[in-house]
Amino acid sequence: MKIGRLEDLGSLRGTALLRVDFNSPIDPSSNMILDDKRFREHAPTVKALEDSKCVIVTHQSRPMKKDFTNLRAHAERLERLIGRPVDYIDDIFGACARDAVKTMDYGEVLMLENVRFNSEEVLTMDGEDAMKTHLVKGLSAMADYYVFDAFGTAHRSQPTIVGLPRVMRSVAGLLMDKEVSTLSKVLTDAPGPVTFVLGGTKVDDSLAVAKNALEAGITDNVVFTGVVANVVYLAEGKKIGKPSTDLVHSLGYDKEIEVAAELLKKYSDRIVTPDHVAVKEDGVRAEYPLENMPQDKGIMDLGIESLAELTGIISNSGTIVLNGPAGVFEDEQFSAGTYELIRASEKAEFSVVGGGHTAAVIEKMGVADRFSHISTGGGACIEFLTGKKLPAVEALEYSKEKFW
């Protein structure tokens, strides 16, 4: 991928338009930011732009949500993290914003209002249409170059993501560069054996990742857990209990059963699912071989015997890609699968986590520093691993070809 990087700009002196993703959990009653992980991830890029006039574009939530709010608290949180003043203005590209940018000095940071307050930013459109929006025209007129660092939004096709790079000299920020280069390594140059451990409830995404990794010869093993494993069981004709079967159908994954069946036909020697499971009986955990589980119960976690098998596969792998919990981890009785697979994965030479619930559990466990990379964008990470070109990456490639 030929995208520009900060060092390609040479001097950073000028007005930098920096797109980040500060979308964070917020207490709607107090407007207090509950988790500043994304601020910490973007802070190195903000600091790298200290010789510029840094104008930050970001969003919080989306229209009609309780946490769709202004960015005053976001500016204050960033200010504390980088140890420099961060001004906030409740305007995006109007006269107030333009005047504020004009009066900035080098080294100053200005955060514009929630960009999704502008109706154009909540629309999905291709790059050609995006570059014609009032939002792109207004923002681009205020800066000398554009830095895209919002990997968490890189799979979206919205004006600031796909439009601005088409009208401005644009580069990836440090976080975006790190995400793309690390995930590219998974697809091209990961130390073997490579094992993908895919769980959770996003079955369509997980099967798409598995399909790409298996077809391209990227992975040696794919381990399915969680609801993804349930779909694979059904594809094999196995009985998984009425509650689990009903859940698969209620989530609309009937077509995914067919997809899983096709993968099994081609790659059964590289696909692994737990053959022992845990259910809830009389309020407590009970374990069974899958073939003997009570059909009035639902699968809550993988069984201990299967856990030993799967951690063995993981321990013998050079690279682990981990995404999605193995069971109903929120219930402590059924958290063992998720937690133990994480503990096994942290020992790999190269380990990548796809964000989302898995990343949250790792943060809670306090072992984030033991992983090579924890993605900041669950959806973007998964789409990247399916082999698709992210809209933001396409836009940055376009910009490099056009403006260099």
Image (cartoon, grey):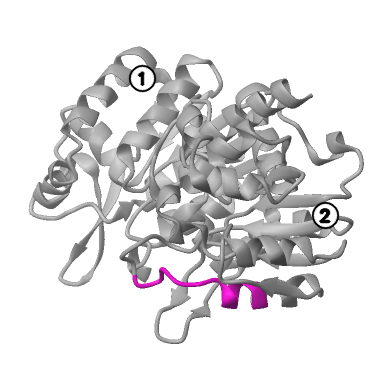
Q: Quadrant of the N terminus?
A: top right
Label drawn at residue 268: 1
Q: Three-letter amino acid code at disc 2?
A: Leu
Q: Position of residue 370 (x, y in %)?
A: 69, 54
Secondary structure under tag 2 reads loop
Q: Nearer the viewer, residue 52 or 226?
A: 52
Q: Position of residue 333 (x, y in %)?
A: 34, 68
Residue ID at (43%, 62%): 61
Is residue 73 on the magenta stretch? yes
Mark nearer the N terminus (2 vs 1): 2
Indicate whether 36 appears above or below 220.
below
- Is 112 placed left or right of 276 in the picture? right
Q: Quadrant of residue 379?
A: top left
- Provide the residue span drawn in magenta: 66-76
Specify whether 49 is left or right of 352.
Answer: right
For the residues marked 2 and 1, what is the alpha-carbon distance in whole angstroms?
Answer: 50 Å
- SS at mark 1 in the image: helix
**In this view, which residue lies farthest toward the front?**
95
Q: Residue at x 44, y 30 (%)?
A: 209
Badge 2 is on which residue? 49
Q: Residues within 10 Å of mark 2 (few under 14, many from 20)?
A: many
Whether residue 367 is in magenta: the answer is no
- Of residues 245 and 354, the one nearer the viewer is 354
In the rendered view, would you say 324 is above or below 107?
above
Name the amino acid type tagged 1.
Ser
How many numbered marks are there? 2
Tell me where residue 44 appears, x and y as whole percent.
78, 57
Depth check, front residue: 243 or 91: 91
Q: Is residue 20 above or below residue 292?
A: below
- Report the mark closest to the observer, 2 or 1: 2
